[in-house]
Image (spheres, helix red, strand yellow):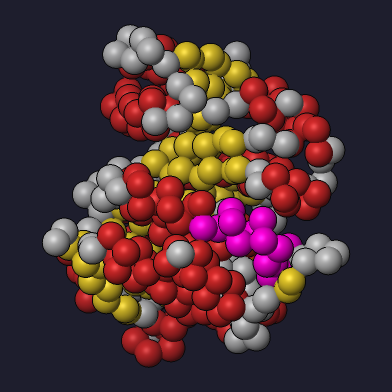
């Protein structure tokens, strides 16, 4: 029997509720396909601050590093907002990404036909959309130096951030994009601003070079401003989008919103030995503890874990199919409710998805 070790970091707010349902789904898959998923729970974010004074302890980091994958809920909330930046809950995520070497963030944005009305865009524009945004996560404008704000002699200030990429950083994210595209519709759009920013002119050259090893994949290039426009104008043209850190931060949110529901969208962060999987939304303190959160983003994050960390494609498809089936049967959480549909809580949504898998 194959065995996988998973570190479960539920975090704050709705984190424990949604992760609880995702773990239930994982267990159902384990039982059905005779796979042992060994889960170990530990604190992260605000919950860790409350107990240990810091958002990520050495023990939690060690557990993550020694696991085969990490499942994360969400961190943060008003309770910890007054803290110094260096010990805020969100610091735990940055540290985990860095320590686990997670340089690639994968965010799918897929439209479920029955939820097409949830989008703010016209149905005919978004029906059939299935995009994977791959964002470089550890370089670019968010990490480059020099950075900071300095006082000038005249009393005003000067702020600096620097966009930096090396050939190898671009090469490895390009390879992730081409590899992922190979398992999809075999098309990559590399997004840059090569007409203005030298760093992204290098980006384009390196991507073209890596593409020589992936001649079965179609590659095109797009400036970031055009991509932002095209995502709204004709999102169906995209399969895989690969881009630098800040462009990816913005474009992945834009792509996510095509679907109209933040509670449905999973993500994967890859690059090192251990992948990390989490919903794209935050800890939703406004609905925490009420059993109304949508657990589907976290459940689909588990499907991504099976696919990308364990190569269990069939089992991952089973989860995705179960989610689609319960939506087709009319089950909805509050955030995606529609007229005539059956509104269920977080726990019940988890239960019906499990029942679907067991069927
Ligand atoms: P949020 O994503 O937590 O919530 C935004 C809105 O979406 C809220 O109205 C919330 O109720 C709703 N929502 C989110 N997830 C939902 C779900 N699964 N089901 C139903 N409704 C859902 O963003 P926010 O309010 O800006 O941030 C809240 C806290 O989360 C902050 O402390 C923020 O720093 C943190 N945060 C954490 C992460 C993370 O852990 N990766 C990401 C974003 C924000």
Which is nearer the eye, 9 or 90?
A: 9
Which is nearer the eye, 342 or 264?
A: 342
**For the point 84% across and 38% down, which residue is it?**
122
> Is residue 70 shown left or right of residue 242?
left
Residue 67 rendering spot, x and y as whole percentages: 21, 63
Q: Which residues are magenta?
A: 322-336
> Is residue 128 shown left or right of residue 216?
right
**Residue 326 belongs to magenta span:** yes
**Residue 289 belongs to magenta span:** no
Task: Please determine whether, in this image, residue 166 is positioned above or below residue 319.
Answer: above
Q: To which quarter of the image does residue 158 belong?
A: top right
Residue 247 rendering spot, x and y as whole percentages: 57, 36
Which is nearer the eye, 52 or 336?
A: 336
**For the point 29% across and 13% down, which residue is it?**
213
**For the point 36% across and 80% down, which residue is it?**
43
Residue 235 rendering spot, x and y as whole percentages: 69, 30
Let me know if residue 184 appears in the view. Answer: yes
Let me know if residue 7 appears in the view. Answer: no
Q: Main secondary structure of the magenta part?
A: helix
């Amino acid at each position: 029997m194959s065995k996988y070790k998973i570190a479960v970091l539920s975090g704050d707010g709705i984190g424990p509720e949604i992760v609880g349902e995702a773990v239930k789904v994982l267990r159902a898959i384990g039982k059905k396909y005779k796979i042992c998923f060994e889960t170990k729970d530990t604190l992260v974010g605000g919950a860790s601050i409350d107990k240990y004074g810091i958002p990520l302890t050495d023990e939690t980091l060690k557990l993550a590093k020694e696991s085969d994958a990490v499942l994360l809920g969400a961190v943060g909330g008003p309770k910890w907002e007054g803290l110094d930046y260096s010990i805020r809950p969100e610091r735990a995520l940055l540290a985990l990404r860095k320590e686990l070497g997670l340089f690639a963030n994968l965010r799918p944005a897929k439209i479920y036909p029955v939820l097409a009305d949830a989008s703010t865009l016209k149905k005919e524009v978004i029906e059939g959309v299935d995009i994977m945004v791959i964002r470089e996560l550890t370089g670019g404008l968010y990490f480059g130096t020099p950075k900071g704000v300095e006082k000038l002699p005249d009393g005003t200030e000067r702020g600096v951030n620097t966009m930096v990429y090396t050939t190898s950083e671009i090469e490895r994210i390009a390879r992730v994009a081409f590899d992922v595209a190979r398992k999809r519709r075999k098309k990559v759009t590399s997004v840059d601003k090569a007409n203005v920013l030298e760093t992204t002119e290098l980006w384009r050259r390196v991507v073209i070079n890596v593409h020589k090893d992936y001649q079965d994949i179609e590659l095109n290039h797009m400036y970031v401003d055009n991509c932002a426009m095209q995502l709204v104008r004709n999102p169906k043209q995209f399969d895989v989008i690969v881009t630098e850190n800040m462009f990816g931060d913005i474009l992945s949110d834009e792509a996510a919103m095509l679907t109209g529901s933040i509670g449905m969208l999973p993500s994967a962060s890859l690059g090192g030995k251990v992948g990390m999987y989490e919903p794209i939304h935050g800890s939703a303190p406004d609905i925490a503890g009420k059993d109304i959160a949508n657990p589907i983003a976290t459940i689909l994050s588990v499907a991504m874990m099976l696919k990308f960390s364990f190569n269990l494609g069939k089992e991952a498809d089973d989860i995705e199919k179960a989610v689609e089936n319960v939506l087709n049967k009319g089950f909805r959480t509050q955030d995606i409710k529609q007229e005539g549909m059956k509104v269920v809580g977080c726990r019940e949504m988890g239960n019906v998805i499990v029942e679907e898998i067991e069927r």
